[in-house]
Image (tube, rainbow, N blue to C red):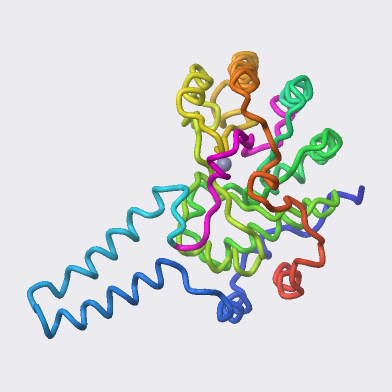
Amino acid sequence: MKKNSGNAGRSAFSYNPLLFQRSRGRALSRAEKSGLIAAGSTGILAFAVPILVPLPLVFFVLICILAPLFPGFSFFYPVISHGRRDVRQISLTFDDGPDPVATPALLALLARYEFCATFFVNGTKVRRHPELVEAILAAGHEFGNHSYSHDGCIMFRSPSRLAQEMLLTQRCLARHGVHPVFFRPPVGVNVPAYAEALHLSGLKAVNFSCRARDMGNRRVKGLARRILRQIQPGDILLLHDTAPPGAPHNVQLWLAELEQIFHALKKRHLKVVPLGALCSSSCKKNHDDLSEDSIHFLN
Ligand SMILES: [Zn+2]
């Protein structure tokens, strides 16, 4: 393994016009198409029924405001949130790690059930805990990109900053020979700025269809009940392998809740498959797939 250092510092978070040059090749999103339709409808109504002129634009703005609240809504860019509903299989995903307490305990539990999971990691933690990345890899699990800093206000950042969040994490993982293809927005909030960032990084957005609203493991009690009452074939489960910041993490209770979920999955004959298989794609790709522009963008 290469030395886990690098120059992922403050200077990396800066405007780069390259991002906007590349956006030319991106297909129109549903949001952009809806905006054009709304503008066209406004023009037609101006001649036909002038009193209704504001309606299409009001409707469009309303969708734009509400869309980020729906993690699986492919409005601003394509989002994968579940697999096929007619096949009895699901995927386990764990966000916000790796964590020196939670992750090793989780790996042991996953090994006992022979389950494969996908770890959506933060670049800062990857740099801090390279040994945990190696342990996850050695156990045969997969990785996703969950931003570099997990900034609480990330949804208000520029496309340029978001792209750097993604590419810095890609670079941290590349030192371990890992090249994820999936990105999960922190807090699952889809905002328009991600469209440009995803286009540049070549990553695909993946959210989830089943979650316990555990608030990053602040609400662990009842986690299994909340998951098991809603889970269905094709689901992507959102869980966390992290200690909640500023709050105690009852790891034993968390593991007991997870074990209830794992046990129920076996009992209900819901096969746990890697996220790449559920989404009919691979979770890893060749480093060459990162465009030269992306590499320059980081430097
Ligand atoms: Zn997160």
Q: Position of residue 137 (x, y in %)?
A: 83, 39
Magenta region includes residue 97: yes
Describe residue 15's horizontal placement relative to residue 277 as left or right. left
Q: Farthest bottom residue?
A: 47
Name the quadrant containing residue 246: top right
User: Which residue is the extreme one toward the right?
Assistant: 1
Residue span colored magenta: 76-103
Position in image of residue 163 (x %, y %): 61, 63
Quarter holding ligand 1: top right
Q: Is residue 205 above or below residue 197?
A: above
Name the residue rendered at 39%, 48% in the picture.
69
Residue in the foreground of this view, choosing between 194 and 77: 77
Q: Position of residue 177 (x, y in %)?
A: 85, 52
The quadrant where residue 275 appears:
top right
Q: Please tell me whether residue 286 is drawn above or below residue 268 in the rendered image.
A: below
Q: Main secondary structure of the magenta part?
A: loop
**Any magenta on residue 86?**
yes
- Say left or right for 261 vs 225: right
Rendering coords of residue 237 (x, y %): 57, 35
Q: Nearer the viewer, residue 97 or 76?
A: 76
Q: Examine the rendered structure and indicate whether residue 124 appears above or below residue 40.
A: above
Q: Where on the picture, by quarter, is residue 238?
A: top right
Asked whether, in this view, residue 270 is left or right of residue 135, the answer is left
What's the residue at 68%, 47% (across, down)? 144
- The residue positioned 82% from the left and 41% from the top of the image is 130
Q: Quadrant of the C terminus?
A: bottom right
